[in-house]
Amino acid sequence: MSGFHASQCGFCTPGMCMSIFASLINADKSKRPEPPKGFSKLKVSEAEKAFSGNMCRCTGYRPIVDACRSFASDVDLEDLGLNIFWKRSDKNPDVSELPSYTLGGGVCTFPDFLKSEIKSSLNHLNDVYISASREGWYHPRSIKEYYELINSCLYSDSVKVVVGHTSSGVPGYKDQDLYNKYIDISGIPELSNIVKKESGFEIGAATTISRTIEILKQECESISSPNGCVVFRKLADHMSKVANPFVRNTASIGGNIILAQKYPFPSDIATILLGAGATVCLQVVTERRQITLEEFLEQPPLDPTTLLLSIFIPHWISDYQAETSLLFETYRAAPRPLGNAVSYVNCAFLGLSSVDEQSDTLVLSNLRLAFGAYGTEHAIRAKMVEKFLTGKSLTALVVLGAVRLLRETIVPMEGTSHPEYRVSAAVGFLFSFLSPLAKGIPEPGKALTSGWSDSADTDDVRNLPLSSRRETISNGDYKPVGEPIKKYAVELQASGEAVYVDDIPAPKNCLYGEFIYSTQPLAYVKNIKFKSSLASTKIINVVTAKDIPRGGENIGSSFVFGDEPLFGDPIAEYAGQALGIVIAETQRYADMAAKQVIIEYDTKDLSPPVLTVEQAVENSSYFSIPQEYSPKEVGDFSRGMAEADHKIPAAEVKLASEYYFYMETQTALAIPDEDNTLVVYSSSQYPEFAQRVIARCLGIPFSNVRVITRRVGGGFGGKAFRSFQVATAAALCAYKLRRPVRMYLNRNTDMVMVGGRHPVKACYSVGFKSDGKITALHLDLLINAGISPDASPIIPDTQGSLIADAIIEHVASVLSVDANSVREKNFHTYDTLQLFYPDNAGEASEYTLHSIFDRLASTSSYLDRAESIKQFNSSNKWWKRGISCVPLIFRAEQKPAPARVSVLNDGSIVVEVGGIEIGQGLWTKVQQMTAFALGQLWENGYEDLLERVRVIQADTLNLIQGGLTAGSTGSEASCAATLQACNMLIGRLKPVLDRLQQQSENVSWDTLISQASKENVYLSASAYWVPDQDSYRYLNYGAGISEVVFFLFILKKCRWRLIFLQEQLLY
């Protein structure tokens, strides 16, 4: 992982490593031939699927997959991306440079303490009525013992029956309260039986999904009929996309179906088994019942007195006649194709087809058309469509009739997200199933490859392998700055040893907190109470605005544009605003207790809340904008419109909100210290302001608050100002209770309270010439800033690029010309660049956007590909392709930054900077800059210094005025401050070095530092770098091409090609 630059923030990296290792071990267990020495039996085609259960927000999957592919026996080394083992220009990469792999994974020692725990738990399991934990886990060994437990006095308690207990991690279906007792039925042998029968096989309900997939594949191999295994094979393939490998290895197939029966859970497994005609066996006290899965799903929600024993899956071979063909297909539309995502819609279609000799068309019979997850209580069969299709000759008109009928059948429940898409996808899947069988309809799947003969790429877009191309050019004058070295501390990230806030061991007597937040906007909070439940009994304290110390403020966030309260008191101003904090002994208890809250609201005498930008305009609800951020008119709009050949008088572009989606949610640990002080560990991009907000809330001096941030598991702007609230809440609780308090928001609370990036509505009028030259543009930006201004006034700079490109595309569409021609007509000249960026344009020679854009269009064969796309789209009815080439101007604004560089007596170097390592490689760049700067004492002096540099955590009392790490300039500023500090040290060390070199020509770094220490030279230097006022803002230029393919019926986007060029890497 480290060698392929496959870790950035590092929060997901240990999981990636575990997935790679599991894939290698599983491949090595196969019966494949022995691989070359140093490689595994893994195939390149399997590498991408190794991560179907993992998510990464910042690194991107390409380098991670490259790390996995490097172990594959069939890997082409030239296809691997940027790495530290060889240069990209090397024509013959040396395989010996790669770390060698030991077949079977090498020696892996299972920890002794885990062996002891497992042995102990197994001993406990021998006694059925011995609970394995204080929450009361029971493990019946037979159905009889299970019912004895259910019928005992335990039944008066809250009881949960589990196998893998994976439902506790499914959003929307997580436990709403704690349970007194848990009954684990995975140890009942009858629930894990596999019984092969003449017409199929019966699988125990406690069998894991992974084991079910194995059995289905084994059955495929054992069935002699060439088409008899079609059902099992398709079921196995579809189940491999359900959840992820970790869940499938634990979750039971019966548990999945039970979840679908009791709740509106969008189960893929229930849908595909319904389509396959599965039946279930139930135990109801002493009675056993065999019913269809359809009947089972339609029953009222089961209680613990009914036990699902097994599922029977037929293979349908007995219905297979010589003149008929068995058809079975499954489909799913989900945010991610390889699993780890709940479906928007899933389907399974089964039937028999035969040929009508008179009309030479196919006729369907025994149809089972199952649909689920589209916003329904449970999976259903489209029986009206089945009846309509049965016995009819499949023609285009019949398929059209079936599609129309299905649209009447698939009706999502009210409140279902994306209802139109779900219906469209369901219809598209049915069309995909029927169209290859119908006479007179081009087959959508095969149509994809027609008309591609002139295309540069002829692979099916749905099966494209990942590829990587990258060229690195660096100036040797500044080595190692700019060199693609390993990320600083990447081995710690990959091994799981890197410490994030939640990894800090809990101090003695540590408590945990979770927010209580409003579910209504703009309402008085009359009362907060809790349900009578087990979780409520775990509450130790509830902290609200009333607990803010005298002299403190109700403040939870702050920036130059204003403050934001920590608690809504007495009015909850918006849904998601904190009203209090529940304190408990564990994070799980705190999270569960917060779910028990009952809040009484009152909206008397309050105006209706303003929820949209349109309502804000109607009510004149605006935040004031500082003069320097106010829009300024450039040129004469009326004159420009008069000169235009064409006009678009009114149009709009809308940008929806976007959740930051860092892997590490908002978290903080506050520890009371002596003399009324606090130490707060915060996952924050702005510890300096966190310190201020905490101190103001508590009414204590800033010096009494120490905020420490070592590293952040992803930020993306979401931990700039929104992190203050969590840090302040934890600090307030710790201050009040005089005990350490940790808060680690669950994903749901994080998304509700933190919000996301700004939704924007842009209304524009534009005039333009016939050649695409824009002569006038009027733009009104409506930005939904939420409840407070925070950083909203500076947001238009970052979102203007998309809006501008949408306008260009609109103009090109009106003129029916290629959008690139319009873009090139409207490129800035250096003179117009100065009009729009008067203080940032730089020198004329620095304006390189033209050359970048031309080089991108040339190297990517844009014109050829655009022509190929036209041909493709004209010859393909269902699949369409598109291409877009987008230029970009990004204005960077440098911020002041501090740094301290200290050289210890052994020659090791410690560097402190205000910038925060979020995954962008700030520490790596600081390490490089330190080695370069101090290495100037000798020729190539950096080579010995790079590994001696240690960059340490940000601490607001050790290094003040750390500033905000954001806007792609935090690394640049930290490096500039480090350079200043290093130059101060060089000034002190150079005289010592000169004296030593008079005595000996070769003077080592260790000798120099030793002598400097003896001469009492101060070996620590602090600097505060302040950018020049005439150059602290500058422009960066870049461009990118993206090409996509989509299926018209389902609009399922597929990645085709992405190419990016940028003028320079941002420090």
Image (tube, rainbow, N blue to C red):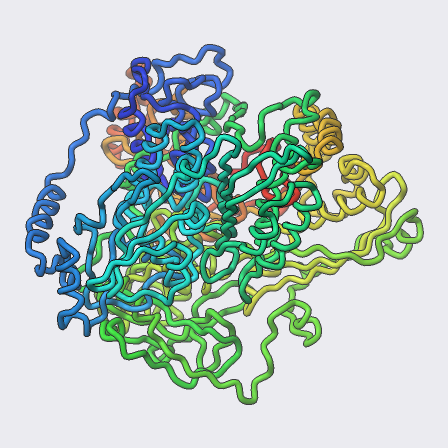
Name the residue at 69% across, 24% down.
861
Name the residue at 32% across, 75% down.
543
Quarter of the N terminus within the rendering? top left
Name the residue at 43% across, 68% down.
556
The answer to which image quadrant residue 168 occupies is bottom left
Name the residue at 33% across, 53% down.
280
Between 374 and 1015, the one lying in front of the other is 374
Q: Is residue 131 above or below residue 697?
A: above
Q: Percent x, y for residue 486? A: 39, 29
The answer to which image quadrant residue 961 occupies is bottom left
The answer to which image quadrant residue 749 occupies is bottom left
Between 562 and 885, the one lying in front of the other is 885
Q: Percent x, y for residue 444? A: 64, 36
Between 20 and 417, the one lying in front of the other is 417
Residue lying at the far bottom of the rendered structure: 605
Residue lying at the far top of the rendered structure: 92
Q: Is residue 236 above or below residue 535?
A: above
Q: Percent x, y for residue 74? A: 41, 18
Query: Is 979 displayed left or right of 282 in the figure?
Result: right
Q: Is residue 665 above or below residue 478?
A: below
